[in-house]
Amino acid sequence: MKVLLDTNALMVPEQFGVDIFSELERHGYLEFLVPRAVAEELEAVSRNAKRGRDKVAAKVALGLIEGCQMVERRGDADSVLLELALDRGAAVFTNDKLLKKRLLSRGITVVYLRQCRYLDIAMRKEF
């Protein structure tokens, strides 16, 4: 299965010490996709972040994306993630609450960090 990685998801390994790739594989996700928009956001954070922790996490994340498949799509990262998820039938790994709500409302599976220790999956609930 495919999963698109958001900016904050790629910063999880440095910020929380969670091996996201092992966790994603445990859930059956073997294709890791990163939109160019997310890479550009990480570059901006690594250049402009005032807090050292975010700056370091963004630099680590930039190294991690080298092992992922880059998708050449630019624009607003949240919108790009939504479009690509729909186009490619992929889940999205994000910790952004508003984006998570938006994705779930469109029927897109969301992977997220739970209790700062492991990844969990949310799917739209049918009523």
Image (tube, helix red, strand yellow):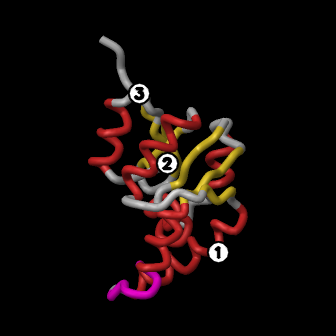
Compared to 11, does 89 lie above or below? above
**Where's the N terminus, which quadrant?**
top right
Q: Position of residue 48 (x, y in %)?
A: 37, 86
121 relative position to 30: left or right: left
Percent of width and height locating residue 127? 30, 11
Q: Which residue is mark 1?
A: 63
Q: Residue at x 47, y 70 (%)?
A: 15
Distance (Cα) linking label 1 and label 2: 18 Å
Along the horizontal axis of the image, is 21 left or right of 42? right
**Residue tagged by mark 2?**
93
Q: Position of residue 4 (x, y in %)?
A: 55, 48
Total label count? 3
Residue to which mark 3 is pinned: 107
Closer to us: mark 1 or mark 3? 3
Amino acid carrying label 3: it is Gly
Q: At x 48% / y 72%, what residue is drawn?
A: 40
Q: Residue at x 49, y 40 (%)?
A: 120
The range drawn in magenta is 45-50
Q: Which corner quadrant of the image does residue 104 belong to?
A: top left
Which is more N-terminal, label 3 or label 1?
1
Residue type, mark 1 in image: Gly
